[in-house]
Image (cartoon, rainbow, N blue to C red):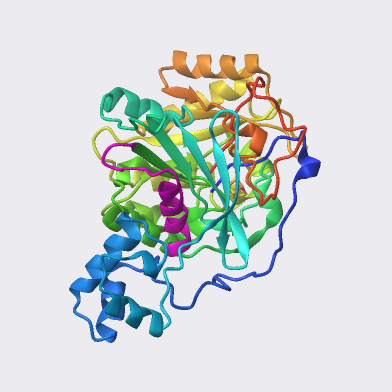
Amino acid sequence: MQGQQEHGAGAETLVLLGRDAVSGQAPDLPSKALFGRSLGELAEAVVALGEKPYRAKQLADALYRQRIDTLDQMTTLPLVFREKLHAAGWSVGRPPIVESFRSVDGTERYLIQTGGQTVETVWMPEGDDAAEDVEEESTSAGQAGGQGVGWKRATICVSSQIGCAVNCRFCLTAKLGLQRNLTAGEIAGQVVTVLARHGVELNRNRVNLVFMGMGEPFLNYDNFMAAVRLLIEEVGIAAPRMTVSTSGIVPGIERFAAEPERPRLAISLNAPNDEVREAIMPINRKWSINDVLEAVRRIPFKPREKVTFEYVLLDGVTDRPEHADELIGLLRRARLPLMVNLIAWNPGPGIEYSSPSNGAVLAFQKLLLEAGIQTYIRRPRGRDIYAACGQLKRTSEAGSGAPSEGDSRGFPNLA
Ligand code: SF4
């Protein structure tokens, strides 16, 4: 799920593209898209054409490792085989970028075509200073490649749904409502399309994935995890390089706990108690903070693994010293290996909250740090192109009046 809102300035330039489907199904994808299929599913398709099963491995390699997006370009496959695929109606079907916007800070935001709609994906060279990046800096220094590509590490923010049903009060995506779930191919396709665009060599360039774009991944659980498995097994990105953020969908957390391989987990907490959380995240009425923490405690964490608590600071609502004190108590009682990402909220159209002052953000962090809680402030990225967390609402242009880069307010991202 994504956090949040967008900044208010320039909001009049946001253009909502069409809303055509309201269901769990992709409406207009090629009916026989190869992309998004597991190795086993590709093998079934290949065998049905009278080909040997090993052709599936070649096909998977072309789709996911070589990132080839048309059958004609798969010249490592015999022409006869490609012609058979064509004749049987198969196509690659990887979702393409239809528009892109580049920020002065290097962040790029893409509109990616998924059926008749677009979904937003963000590329952040050098990451966003959130906890996962800082952690890796200390543990993987020197491993990053990036020679010749102008960046040493990058983070891709991936969407899991078009719109979202969770209705967090501070979130612009919530205003779309749920349009539909993305398929596994559409979720993994965002990643592969962006990797292809930047010529990323995964053995040399350090890339992290955050499932914090539009939508609540745990309300599209099967497709989300199918995408994760594809990304691990076929694309070649290790699970610890991925983080999924949830608003606290307890049944999803419980399923996630049982996964043999899973991304790291972030909980979009955003409040120090149930009363405040219910006011800004109605989902808390269904699953309270305690329900969520109990479910998280059942996850068999690996050594050194931590759960991240995302905390959006809203002026006067969640950013006061007494909120920090209450949060410290809550997190201590949680008895979890954890860290905190603070996200200063930016104003959005039709959303009543206000941004916290820089002083309030720093003071909040200081209190948590003094209490011994590992706490980071997420750096705003791509705010001039509406790419910062919370700004993802399908838009066709980055407008004038967007906040300046000198504005150091935060980078809301919730879940
Ligand atoms: S879960 Fe909440 S913050 Fe995340 S996209 Fe949905 S409404 Fe927005």
In the image, residue 12 lies at what x, y percent?
A: 81, 42
Q: Is residue 187 left or right of residue 238?
A: right
| Residue 349 at least partly seen | no
Up-down: is 271 above or below 364? below
In the rendered image, residue 8 lying in the magenta stretch gets the answer no
Q: Would you place residue 136 above or below residue 224 in this image?
A: above
Q: Residue at x 61, y 18 (%)?
A: 321
Image-quadrant location for residue 273: top right
Give x and y (percent) for residue 196: 41, 50
Quarter assignment of residue 143: top left
Q: Residue at point 67% right, 58% down?
A: 177
Which of 9/283 is in front? 9
x and y percentages locating residue 45 in the rendered image? 31, 79
Nearest the eye: 114 or 59 = 59
Residue 325 at least partly seen: yes
The front one of 205 and 180 is 205
Question: Is 111 displayed left or right of 293 in the figure?
Answer: right
Query: Is 4 on the left or on the right of 106, as rendered?
Result: right
- Magenta span has 202? yes
Residue 104 x, y percent position in the rendering: 60, 29
Magenta region, mostly helix, strand or loop? helix
Q: Look at the image and give the residue range highlighted in magenta.
A: 185-205
In the image, taking residue 41 as reference, residue 157 lies left or right, namely: right
At 55% from the left and 32% from the top, the residue drawn is 311
Residue drawn at the location 31% of the way across and 23% of the way down = 138
Say above or below: 323 vs 247: above
